Amino acid sequence: MLQATKEMESRATNGDRSGAAGEQDDAPGDVIEGFTREELHSLLADMLLYRRFEEKAEEAYAIGKIGGFCHLHIGQEGLAAGATRPLRADDPIITAYRDHTLAIAKGITPRAAMAELYGRVDGCSGGRGGSMHLFDPTVGFMGGHGIVGGQIPIGAGLGWAIRYRGEDQVCVCFMGDAAVNQGVFLESLNMSAIWQLPVIYVVENNGYGMGTAFSRVSATEMEARSGAYGIPAHTVNGQDVLETYRFFADMAERVRAGAGPQFVNAETYRFRGHSMSDPVSGTYRSKEEVESHVQEQDPIKILRDRMMEADLLSQAELEAMDAEVRAICEDAAEFADASPIPDPSTLYDHVYAEINQHGRLFLDGRGPGPAAGGRLAAGGQAGGPGGHANG
Ligand SMILES: Cc1ncc(C[n+]2csc(CCOP(=O)(O)OP(=O)(O)O)c2C)c(N)n1
Ligand SMILES: [Mg+2]
């Protein structure tokens, strides 16, 4: 791997908090809103990496290298960078299926993320999860969940575990705007408020759940959704990475200090279709609407332009940065392509169920026979006396 690639891979991890705002020593003109030149370059490079990674995934999907569902985060990178970079390495985050760039932002390498999208053994979930189920607890990335709202009570559970152990991490639980209409959202917020859990619930409010505008499925504004539980609501512009970063840096420390759960309406916009198999626009939103957001609300362009106007970024520097992140994504795709597919005999490994007396995981009417080479599922005994839980 290129040296530059290594550096970028390590910078992409959340262990590096060099983006912290507030360096006061810089001469006026060398900072934007308290962010130093180095911090600004780092945030821009991160967002550019996320964008190029997604474009590479898009390309790989189009030629059949990636199968199944694939939901891109393009347009929402300001949140991936701004909401996760201020966190500590041991702060857990959890999200839904639009998870690639949040995973990379939290420390999963582009190689491990891309190999997972390709369904290969070197993927962060061993090639078993795919696009919607990136996962790596060692970097505090707790998924990648395909069920709308399914991650919300798990986020509350992560917060509960922090309290139970007497530790001081903060959990950030991301969700889409459609997820706030799921029953588990209400239950999770209620329990979080009662137990004062250290969880920041963040709605990546891109205005739509697939083809349904939020205004069509909600009688109230988003901010009103947490009020019934006494959880403070906040709104942040997710397309402005500096505002987002500052907001989360402050909020994470307040929650760490005991402020209790918080609810954040992060306004953003998805530049692509709901998933790779959906059109970018359609009856639910016009081509013009998408185009105007791409032109005016691109978090990367917004930061780039501000840096250029302040003479903190040259065209040559931008091109070098872009070349560097493109090389990382190219390398990730080559790595993924070269990684083997998982051995079919390991199909039932990590399945949290016992094997029945027929040697199968489920009663499927096929009669006795060895299941996947007689391998043990978690806690079970292949074909043995313990294997009757499902049968
Ligand atoms: C419980 C459940 N119901 C329905 C679906 C199908 N589904 C997949 S994505 C989606 C829309 C979710 O939209 P939102 O939460 O706003 O997230 P976004 O896609 O905008 O990031 C739906 C309804 C699902 N995955 N899970
Ligand atoms: Mg949405």
Image (cartoon, helix red, strand yellow):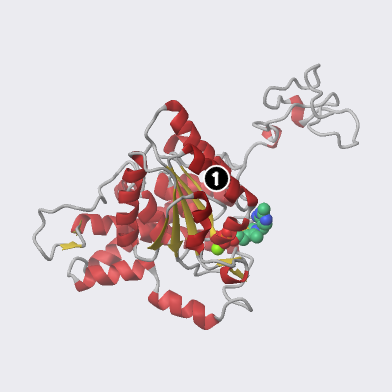
Question: Where is residue 322 drawn, in percent x and y?
Answer: 33, 63
Question: Where is residue 355 drawn, in percent x and y?
Answer: 77, 27
Most foreground residue, 293 or 53 = 293
Q: Amino acid at mark 1?
A: Asn
Locate ligand 1 by image quadrant: bottom right
Question: Where is residue 242 drawn, in percent x and y?
Answer: 30, 60
Most foreground residue, 112 or 386 = 386
Dot 1 falls on a residue whose secondary structure is helix
Q: Is residue 110 visible?
A: no
Residue at 19% over, 66% down: 312
* Residue on which disc 1 sits: 190
Question: Where is residue 127 drawn, in percent x and y?
Answer: 59, 42
Asked whether, in this view, residue 250 is left or right of residue 333, the answer is left
Q: Tell me where residue 219 sits by quadrant.
A: bottom right
Residue at 51% over, 49% down: 229
- Would you call the spot at circle 1 few (<14 residues within 10 Å), some (14-19), or many (20 or more)? some
